[in-house]
Amino acid sequence: MTTASRRALFKGAAAATVAVGWSQASGWVTAAEAAPAGMVPVPALDGTLETAPAVLARFSHDFGELVRGTPRAVLRPGSVADVVRIIRYARRAGLKVAMNGQSGTGADLESHSNYGQAAVPGGISIDARSLSTIHSIGAGSAVVDAGVTWAQLADAALARGLTPPALTDYLNLSIGGTISVGGVGGTVQKYGLLVDTVQEVDVVTGAGDLVTASATVRPDLFNTVLAGGGQVGVIVRATVKLVPAQARALNLNLYYNDLATYTADAEKVMRDGRFDHQEGGIVPTADGTGWRYKIEAVVYYNPPGTPDQGRLLAGLRHDRASLEVQDTTYREWIFRADAWEAFLKEYGYWQQAKPWLSMVLPTSAVPAFTAAVVAELTAADLGGGFTGLYPFPTRKLTRPMFALPATGEPVTYLFDLLRFPGPEQTGDIDRMLRQNRRLYDLGVSLGGKRYLVGAVPNMTGADWRRHFGPHWATLRAAKLRFDPDGILTPGQGFFS
């Protein structure tokens, strides 16, 4: 095939899939079609607005594989200006818009929400990966586009001896998507959530305005876009904190046979700060018939110095015979989930429906809530997944849209039920979703809140008002101000 014929073929294919106008009567119109009466032309874009069925199909589902919602078009922005243009256009046309992080690796990029939170049925989905430039890395911060992943930033920062202080366990997530819901990691005890390390954001509001916001400049927007579920604006750029990176990571896994001893030790090491990273959870016993508890504790260091294990473990009451120790490079540690991802993909877990549940619990609720979980959960229910249960000081969380227990207790626990059912468990998904709802209702009755990424069915307006509590009025006022036509991120369902 000649160069000229290849160009002609490409031009014809593009004409058949790129939208040039919208008509209320006939929907999107491509360049290959005659313009109907009343068509509103799409503004000139640096990127493209695509309508090909294969493209729409990729944006019709998310990581959870529980909810389907096909958009009418996908914007591949060539610039931030394209996001401004398309939001203004969607507002005039009465179309909904949502940013889609397109997280993951390889060819299976998708929103990593679990229950349609980034879905925009009949609307316009914005491909965040088309905005994926790391603009600068300085001694204390990095400026990145929203579609940059934490993995990309971590590697770029490590090349300069730096690292984001707060990271998710799985790094192949878009920065914009993560900070729109909060972002939890093992350094929350020291640095807070990922949103607590964000210094500034560029946001395209639902009114189509490009605005820079920080804690001191437009704090009303800053505090509602971070962990606000995409309701007031689309994050297109962020300035995030960086700190010096250490070379190595010593990981100590401590096991406990009863909850009270586990929580006492977990809160002890949280308070005294002896570890750089602290997580933990409920894990099956060796024979799979019961449950025990694990602290995952990590200290970072630079050779030739080495951590003193005796000092690190002093005063703790774990089962010493079960202690697990692993010493790796810092990079190997923060990218540890990559091997787990490969395993889940190889054995078919990654592709299945994932009924996840994440709760934020007051300390006083942990005994009753955990008792309910272990009473009905089986090891088989987890499939290839796991649970999380670990404390952090409430004072470290500074962004108001991340809902915290109303009890006002100084210590809060994250509970994660991150199930990866196997292919043979397809028939159990509805049961697991019903279980999620029961556990959610129990957690709320004990003063808890949910984390926005999970799968909780049948959330009502009353549920969401109770979830945000005293901050509901703030979020609603910001929604009316910054997204007056209500076009942004309908999948969260806050205002439906």
Image (cartoon, rainbow, N blue to C red):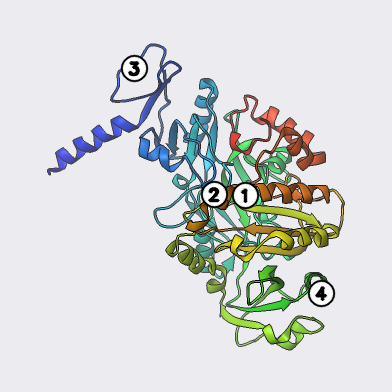
Q: Are marks 2 and 4 in contact (CB under 8 Å)?
A: no
> Residue 339, image x and y in percent?
49, 69
The three-letter amino acid code for the residue at tag 3 is Ala
Q: Residue at x 78, y 62 (%)?
A: 371
- In the rendered structure, the answer to whether residue 332 lies left or right of residue 356 reads left
Please report whichever mark, 4 or 3, sits nearer to the chain's N-terminal start: 3
- In the rendered structure, the answer to whether residue 441 lies left or right of residue 128 reads right
Please report whichever mark, 1 or 4, sits nearer to the chain's N-terminal start: 4
- Residue 389 visible in the snapshot: yes
The three-letter amino acid code for the residue at tag 2 is Gly
Q: Are marks 3 and 2 in contact (CB under 8 Å)?
A: no
- Residue 280 visible in the snapshot: no
Label 2 sits on residue: 64
Task: Give the residue furthest to the left.
Answer: 2
C-alpha gap between disc 3 and disc 1 = 49 Å
Q: Secondary structure at mark 1?
A: helix
Q: Residue at x 54, y 60 (%)?
A: 171
C-alpha gap between disc 2 and disc 1 = 15 Å
Label 4 sits on residue: 261
Label 3 sits on residue: 35
C-alpha gap between disc 3 and disc 2 = 38 Å
> Residue 251, image x and y in percent?
63, 78
Label 1 sits on residue: 431
Tell us which disc is closer to us: 3 or 2.
2
